[in-house]
Amino acid sequence: MAIDKNSAVENARNDLARRLNINAADVKEKSVEDDDFPDMALGAPEDGEMSGQMITSGWRIKLEAQGKTYEYRADKNQVRAFNFKGKNHRI
Amino acid sequence: MNRNNFFIHLALALVLVLVAAFAGQLSRWRKQWRSHMGPIVSAEKKRATTTEEIALSETRFGRPEVLVKFKSGVSQETIERLTALRHDRVEDRIENVEGLEAIDDLDNADAATVVSEYQQLAEVEYAEPNFEIELDASEAAGPLEPILPHDPQFTDQWALSNSGQRGGKQGADISATLAWATTTGSDKVVVAVLDSGVDYTHEDLIQNMWMRPASMAPYHDNELGTIDDENGFDAIDSAGDPMDENGHGTHCAGIIGAEGENNIGIAGVNWKVKIMPLKFMNAGGFGTTKDAIEAINYVIDRKKAGVNVRIISASWGSTQRSRALEDAIRKAYENDILFVAAAGNATVNNDRNPHFPSSYNVPNVVSVAALDRHDELAKFSNWGVKSVAIAAPGVDILSTWLGNAYEEKSGTSMATPVVSGVAALILAEHPRMSVDELKKKLLASTDPIVALKGKTVTGGRVNAAKALAN
């Protein structure tokens, strides 16, 4: 099922709360922008992952928690945590 | 003409024939004398130049004239003395190259012999025949006429024929319409699209999809077991149904080989070809290195089983290096399979920040950058004067999509199948060409593009018509 912008933000918020072991209510939405990513892993591939080299439209989601900013990337197929503690994660 | 005049003319003609015959014999005597009494060439040297001499004798010369470069410091007097000794004369001095003389042999000896004479002289740096340059057959027959297909959306395919549509630069294309005057492809050439699978039911692809011949045994892998690969291979599920759930692979397949001249949709670089669909990326458009390797192994296996699969089109990658993937691609090379790969879309120099598999230093890998409709490097495209071989159109490329649809997409993903498609056209014309020759041909037939200077190995855009010439 295709993911829309709102559900992508919701998924990202819940994922960050889980990773930081905090309540989702403590994760604030800083910005959500339409963007083009360089590939089909949204420029955030996991280890050992290969992706189609096609420009892919999606959303760049910035969340705030515990005084820090975290980036998520999403499109209709997926949501990814970008560079979370040095690694990318597909959620 | 009266009877007396007739006999006078007959007598004159006979005299002329006798004079010509005598002159010819004289020339032959001179040649024989020259070969026996002329400059002394050691037997060893003679043997060493035999192959070269054969090659020269097989070459067409306009006249027995040679170009001789005398060493620096050799005086004009010496040059004239040396030529006079051989009953030759300096016909012309090439002003811009010191010591280079065009020499005419007055005995009409063949150029190979004269070249050999001069090569023996200590005063000479080199000598070579003055080759007669002639048009090749295709040029002599006149320029090729472009072939335009009647596929209704062809006018939107700027990559194949850029008429300046939507503000593009006229002629900034791969010269497909001229190439099609030579060939529109062959269903004997199989191109593996290693991707998210292909919608093999798409109406513009269905006629050009590869299917395992009934006479060929299903794919068997010791670990995966036997797989009914009638329509190709799905490495994700180790199954035989490579149906695309994303669209990316279908798009790439259409660029290579959407059926041409069928009055439907678009035309591929090849109107006729066989697309072998391989699925290793999922509905999201990403997959694992392990599944990519499994799919490459499948291609090699099918090649060994008799499928004429000569190209793998790989519109994917990452910055992570995998020795195992590199080894699999090398195995494909050993099996005479070209591996065309996307350079990546991170706007970086791959010489410094490599992208794989396109940056693997394996002889069959052709790394492809993307151009826009203005012949500019696409703003997203990676480059690399050492690591990116060639460029092709890759912005706003119209091609097939899921559900009999068509979409415009951008990326080195789209440039890659353009090059794979041209490689397939070459193989349609030259089916026995080796992978090394094929790569060389692709890279030697580009159009130089200013924006690519210092950005790619060739500095050029792939040109299908040039690739098919000669």
Image (spheres, coloured by chain):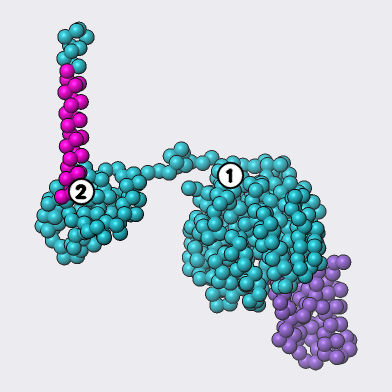
Chain colours: A purple, B cyan
Q: Nearer the viewer, residue B104 or B404?
A: B104
Q: Is residue B94 visible?
A: no
Measuring 70% from the left and 46% from the top, which residue is drawn there? B259
| Farthest front residue in view | B43
Q: Quadrant of residue B413?
A: bottom right
- Neighbour class for label 1 at 10 Å: few (<14), some, many (≥20)? some
Question: Percent from the top left, x then y, of residue B376?
Answer: 55, 62
For the N terminus of chain B, give its image quadrant.
top left
How many numbered tags mark residues here?
2
Question: Percent from the top left, x then y, of residue B431?
Answer: 57, 50
B93 horizontally vs B253: left or right: left
Instruction: Report the span colored magenta.
Output: B11-37
Which chain is disc 2 placed on? B
- Neighbour class for label 2 at 10 Å: few (<14), some, many (≥20)? some
Mark 1, residue position: B183
Above or below, comparing residue B329 to residue B353 in the picture: above
Mark 2, residue position: B35
Q: Secondary structure at mark 2?
A: helix
Question: Percent from the top left, x then y, of residue B271?
Answer: 66, 46
Disc 1 from disc 2: Cα separation: 49 Å
Contact, mark 1 vs mark 2 (Cβ under 8 Å): no
Q: Nearer the viewer, residue A75 or B267?
A: B267
Question: Percent from the top left, x then y, of residue B364?
Answer: 57, 64
